[in-house]
């Protein structure tokens, strides 16, 4: 067993597990139950769900896959700004509102 990922929350851990399995790499999420247990009283930083793979020889492959996943996640989480005029959201690449044309 080898740890390949520290997830932000249990959902993300299972997304990562699903990605790895789609590449034929068997993976397991750990600590998620403990995380759920404290959910009622708020999350503690000490408990982070982690994703592990069974086959250590595929670690490099898993690492590459998750590196790509991280990159994609970052581009999905682009900074957005909200138009002061029409309240539409634009991504950072736009200097003017895509909807009404008001400059940022
Ligand atoms: Zn606008």
Image (cartoon, grey):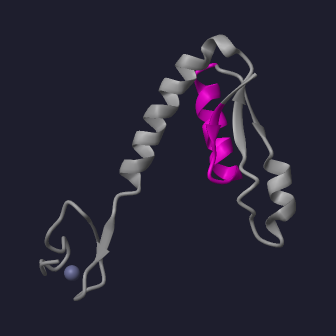
Q: Nearer the viewer, residue 25 or 59?
A: 59
Among all residues in the image, which is located at the extreme front?
46
User: Which residue does the image show at 54% across and 18% down from the upper left?
Assistant: 60
Magenta region, residue range:
4-24
Among all residues in the image, which is located at the extreme bottom?
85
User: Which residue does the image show at 33% across and 63% down from the upper left?
Assistant: 79
User: Which residue does the image show at 62% across and 42% down from the upper left?
Assistant: 15
Question: Is residue 21 rendered magenta in the image?
Answer: yes
Left or right of 80? Residue 12 is right
**Ligand 1: quadrant of the figure:** bottom left
Q: Position of residue 86 (x, y in %)?
A: 25, 86
* Magenta part, dominant SS: helix
Question: Is residue 56 rendered magenta in the image?
Answer: no
Q: Position of residue 72 (x, y in %)?
A: 41, 42
- Would you place residue 49 above or below residue 5 in this image? below
Among all residues in the image, which is located at the extreme top?
57
- Would you place residue 12 above or below residue 81 in this image? above
Q: Position of residue 56 (x, y in %)?
A: 68, 15
Q: Nearer the viewer, residue 76 or 101?
A: 76
Quadrant in the rendering for residue 14: top right
Left or right of 16? Residue 71 is left
């Amino acid at each position: 067993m080898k740890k390949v990922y520290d997830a932000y929350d249990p959902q993300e851990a299972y997304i990562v597990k699903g990605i790895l399995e789609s590449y034929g790499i068997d993976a397991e999420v750990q600590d998620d139950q403990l995380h759920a247990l404290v959910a009622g009283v708020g999350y503690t930083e000490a408990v982070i769900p982690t994703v592990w793979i069974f086959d250590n020889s595929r670690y490099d492959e898993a690492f590459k896959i998750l590196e790509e996943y991280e990159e994609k996640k970052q581009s999905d989480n682009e900074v957005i700004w909200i138009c002061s005029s029409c309240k539409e959201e634009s991504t950072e690449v736009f200097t003017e509102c895509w909807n009404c044309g008001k400059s940022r």
